[in-house]
Amino acid sequence: MEFHKVWCAVALGVLLPFSWAHTDFFTSIGHMTDLINTEKDLVVSLKDYIKAEESKLEQIKKWAEKLDQLTATATKDPEGFLGHPVNAFKLMKRLNTEWGELESLVLKDMSDGFISNMTIQRQFFPNDEDQTGAAKALLRLQDTYNLDTDTLSRGNLPGVKHKSFLTAEDCFELGKIAYTEADYYHTELWMEQALKQLDEGEVSSADKVYILDYLSYAVYQQGDLGKAMALTRRLLELDPEHQRANGNMKYFEYIMAKEKETNKSSPDAEEQQEKETEVKKKDYLPERRKYEMLCRGEGLKMTPRRQKRLFCRYYDGNRNPRYILGPVKQEDEWDKPRIVRFLDIISDEEIETVKELAKPRLSRATVHDPETGKLTTAHYRVSKSAWLSGYESPVVSRINTRIQDLTGLDVSTAEELQVANYGVGGQYEPHFDFGRKDEPDAFKELGTGNRIATWLFYMSDVSAGGATVFPEVGASVWPRKGTAVFWYNLFPSGEGDYSTRHAACPVLVGNKWVSNKWLHERGQEFRRPCTLSELE
């Protein structure tokens, strides 16, 4: 069991280069890929250890076979055998010297190399927070994309190249992690999946008694007393002496009897409870529901009349000298707010350069805390990011110039190019890029005003998931490598456009790399003049 746990940790882990500190491996595929080589190295080391043990056992086996034949002959006629002086000498030599050598060989520890390698690598292994983060990511994907536990367990996901499945023990571990977070809904789902796989005959170290113990409590916490009792009865059939289950059963029976008495005296109580449950369901966050629907591609469809207003074109950046003879391809993604996509706007070579510059600096992405005004990590933004300046690379400088030429906005007051890599279930829940009126100090330290616009490069294709969605208007923009999307966060008046509230959907399958440029108000006074209307 311990051996299995060690290798589970290796399988889930990620190794950073020796100079990197341990930080949230699960938040970046870019960092996690490095651990594939680490695990491969450990497997090679393990195979070397196995070969060494096999070689040692082979030597011992040959010795045993030789001595077996010799002693069989000697014991038939001991006196006659020892009558030969060579046999007498060799017996003395074997017992005095050779058996001692054999003892040394048997006691020799062949694991030194493997244990030494494990010790060195272990300092870079993931910790409990990483495993919990990866588990929560699976649960997040399950909810966002309406995946049942059986689909996830069997690895039947769209666009997968390397199919993998979850064992009953894996399902049990997911259920336990949900349980420690008091997430009884997912505890029930994954404990039931573990139980189902065991009932179907899967051989596993997972114990049905433990599973039923967690499952019955999770079901009880969700108010299904009858099902909790049925599960507890099944547990007691397997382990009649289970102390907690026996105590729970007595308590469940007491509660059940009490509820029956209450229902008799107040026949409308059950109906009232059903109404309250229905109200709770209706109170489910509407934005969350819209966000998840858009992530699944179930967003609002434009009317034909609105669709006719969307065009594709060759764009020269309003007669920018660099693009008059070689205009870029541009297409409309949405009308209000206006979201445009530029095609073939960043080359594969530029993408690789940006990624290589960013990888050593990737750290957990942060958000502005409106209360403190400081940057902090948040559960709703799961990715790693790095910032690149135009001064450090001609490629980054060229990209900045391209953004300025095509938007007509001054990038000298913009923030540095932010590069982000989304890990397992990586996402950024609905948010605004601009500072609202209740956040007057959001970008005070920059001294360049609010974020007037956002430019977003897609630096990879994504097999499934990973869309940029706008819940307020129902728009979904899907990643396409080498393209970029652009929108204004502020009206010309400087007022925030609340319809630009957007989110990065969780990556279901694949790896998502993006980079973005936030352009600020300062320097745009004559490039994008104010209008007389507040919302124009």
Image (cartoon, rainbow, N blue to C red):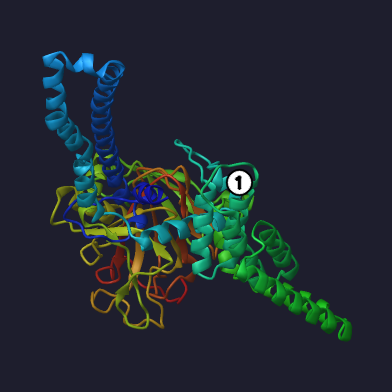
Residue at 21% in and 45% down: 117
Residue 3 percent location from the top left of the image = 37, 48
The quadrant in which residue 277 appears is: bottom right
Nearer the observer, 471 or 296:
296
Q: Secondary structure at mark 1?
A: helix
Nearer the observer, 232 or 373:
232
Residue at 41% in and 49% down: 341
Note whether 50 is above or below 132 in the view shown.
above
Q: Residue furthest front?
A: 79
Q: Residues within 10 Å of mark 1 (few under 14, many from 20)?
A: some
Residue 19 percent location from the top left of the image = 16, 55
Residue 148 appears anywhere in the view? no
Which residue is tagged 1? 197
Residue 94 percent location from the top left of the image = 15, 26
Nearer the observer, 179 or 211:
211
The quadrant in which residue 222 appears is: bottom right
Nearer the observer, 456 or 233:
233
Residue 322 appears anywhere in the view? yes
Q: Amino acid at mark 1?
A: Gln
